[in-house]
Amino acid sequence: MSPVPAATFAEVEEVVADIEGWMTPGQARLLWDCSRAVPAGGTVVEIGSFRGRSMVVLASAAAPGVELVAIDPHAGNDRGPQEINGFEAQAADDHEVFKDNLAYAGVSDRVRHVRKFSDAALDDVQGELDLLYIDGAHRMAPALADIRHWGDRVKPGGDLLIHDSFSSVGVTAALARSLMFGSSFRYLGRSESMTHYRREPVIGTARLRNAGAQLAQLGWFARNVLIKVLIVAKLGGLTRRLGHDPQTWPY
């Protein structure tokens, strides 16, 4: 008998508890709620799936008839914190574990995996997107390309979620170049480093307020950068003074 996908958020929390990845309970809840809101016939795209933790949440929440696409090359690059290149040996294992985790969660038949880099996968998804979740390469250039090229595909009223916002230097720089002062996406807030935007016109004074709400997060961004510097310098114990667990990378 095939596994049955989680029917409630509490159930999916139990399912993903042992799946490796970087996702707080609040971030999982945001993914769940946004995916739950996508109507039948809609499309959810995730860029950067790693071992499937976030996609299990998205797929478990999605209504019947929603298309779910996971885009990840599983190539051993941009794998995690301080794992930009040189992890080719782990790539095949990541791919197999990703498939096993989706199967364990009972969502394998719902998810189409595109094993390509995101810039090469644009033609693999047709039409507009109801929900786009970006957790791909964190360097500014590829992060900016994902926001611009894939963000353009989000339909009016659709949601855009971006992980490691105001935490990663590259992702934050990409936000500043694309969304912070833009007029196409309204900033709705964040759960830790996961920001939530909605595609709708932002004009006049609303555009100034939208930019101001994002600029207000830069203090938290500076804190996260300091925490990372201390961890890299092997002074992680000092991060307790900033209210951080020195055993974890901020996300």
Image (cartoon, grey):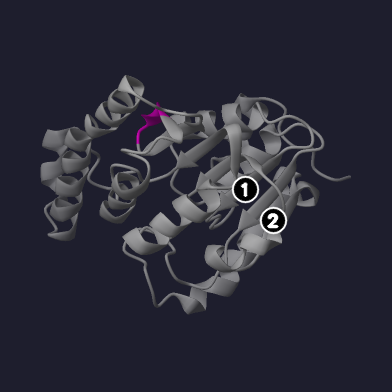
> Callout 2 environment at 10 Å: few (<14), some (14 to 19), or many (20+)?
some
Magenta stretch bounds: 187-192
Q: Nearer the viewer, residue 2 or 178?
A: 178
Instruction: Determine whether the residue tagged by mark 1 lies in a helix, strand or loop.
Output: strand
At horizontal 40% and vertical 78% (from top left) the residue drawn is: 86
Kindly identify the residue that appears in the image at 14 percent across and 47 percent down. 226
Residue 188 position by quadrant: top left
- Main SS of the magenta segment? strand
Q: Are marks 2 and 1 in contact (CB under 8 Å)?
A: yes
Q: Nearer the viewer, mark 2 or mark 1?
A: 2
Q: Quadrant of the N terminus?
A: top right
| Residue 165 among those drawn in magenta | no
Task: Name the amino acid type tagged 1.
Answer: Val
On screen, residue 244 versus residue 117, left or right, reads left
Check the image and report above or below for 175 versus 136.
Answer: above
Q: Which residue is mark 2?
A: 125
Q: Position of residue 32 (x, y in %)?
A: 59, 31
**Which residue is under mark 1?**
45
Q: Is residue 12 above or below residue 127?
A: above
Q: Give percent across and percent down for residue 110.
A: 77, 47
Asked if residue 226 lies left or right of residue 54, the reply is left
Mark 2 lies on a secondary structure that is loop
Location of residue 210 (image quadrant): top left
Residue with the most extreme right position: 1
